Amino acid sequence: MEILGYAASIIMGLLLGLIGGGGSILTVPILVYLFGIHPVLSTTYSLFVVGLTSLVGSYSHFKTGHVHVKTALVFGVPSIISVYATRKFIMPVIPDPVFSIASFTFTKPLFIMVLFAILMILAAVSMIRKSKISTDTAPEIKYNYPIIFLEGLLVGGITGLVGAGGGFLIIPALVLLARLPMKQAVGTSLLIIALKSLVGFTGDLDSGYIINYTFLFMFSAFAVAGILAGSYLARFISGNKLKVVFGWFVLVMGTYILGKELLF
């Protein structure tokens, strides 16, 4: 199972490099189901893995001029504040169990996995649905600051709860709210994901969780190898076509996880 898990981490990085967003949604299921790591701790690990992998991926986009640093800061600052606050103050006070009804107990790990499954389904729908967002170069980058701030807080909160990067939310927001061209939106989203995920990870450092850094760095190394390969292959493979196929896979996985956690 560990060999399969490390292979899956490469695939996760590969998809992140190929399609720019959505690949990180696999990190927590890989950690929970293939490595047997507790769901709450898996979200901590995922923040580090996703953050480091996205940081490496954003560098290749930066070299080609597809990272808009000002936009990353405008969108990233509220996301960073939100994800850190969520990990530092909100996650520790979520009760376990969350609630009980008759013989059914809704535990904190169950809450994390159900929320994650719902996020997977929403991400899948976003990837499957044909995008109506223009890929043309925008004549001028403009910012809708209030909405960007609220969107940043929302995405940061989601990242803090489930440990996923939220690229499927960030990329449309950058195109629609900041009017970035699609290629810049993809590269910029990776930098935003990297910053908020790594800062979110620091919010867990004094939480009392026992972190296996040897495993964490090894898992991250495989994921980084995947995103480097994905960034290279993206020159030859249509990311849009791959995103639809991957979207259907994520939809099946999200539905399976939701059913497994609630019904079995």
Image (cartoon, rainbow, N blue to C red):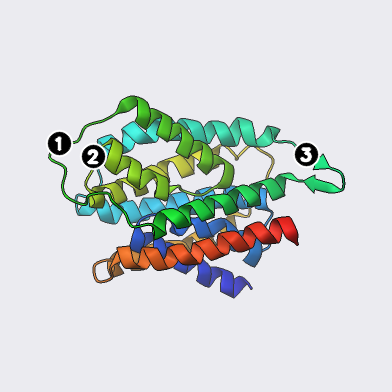
Circle 1: residue type: Glu
Q: Is residue 260 visible?
A: yes
In this picture, is 241 found above or below 192?
below
Q: Which residue is mark 2?
A: 179
- Residue lying farthest to the left in this orientation: 139
Decide which of 83, 45 is in the foreground and name it.
83
Q: Which residue is mark 3?
A: 99
Q: Which residue is mark 1?
A: 140
Q: Is residue 127 left or right of residue 102?
A: left
Q: Is residue 14 visible?
A: no
In this picture, is 44 found above or below 17?
above
Circle 2: residue type: Arg
If you read the primary sequence from the N terminus, does the residue marked by circle 1 or circle 2 appear first? 1
Q: Is residue 75 left or right of residue 161?
A: left
Q: Residue at x 62, y 53 (%)?
A: 42
Crowdedness near tag 1: few (<14), some (14–19) or many (≥20) residues, C-alpha within 10 Å: few
Secondary element under disc 1, as helix, strand or loop, is loop
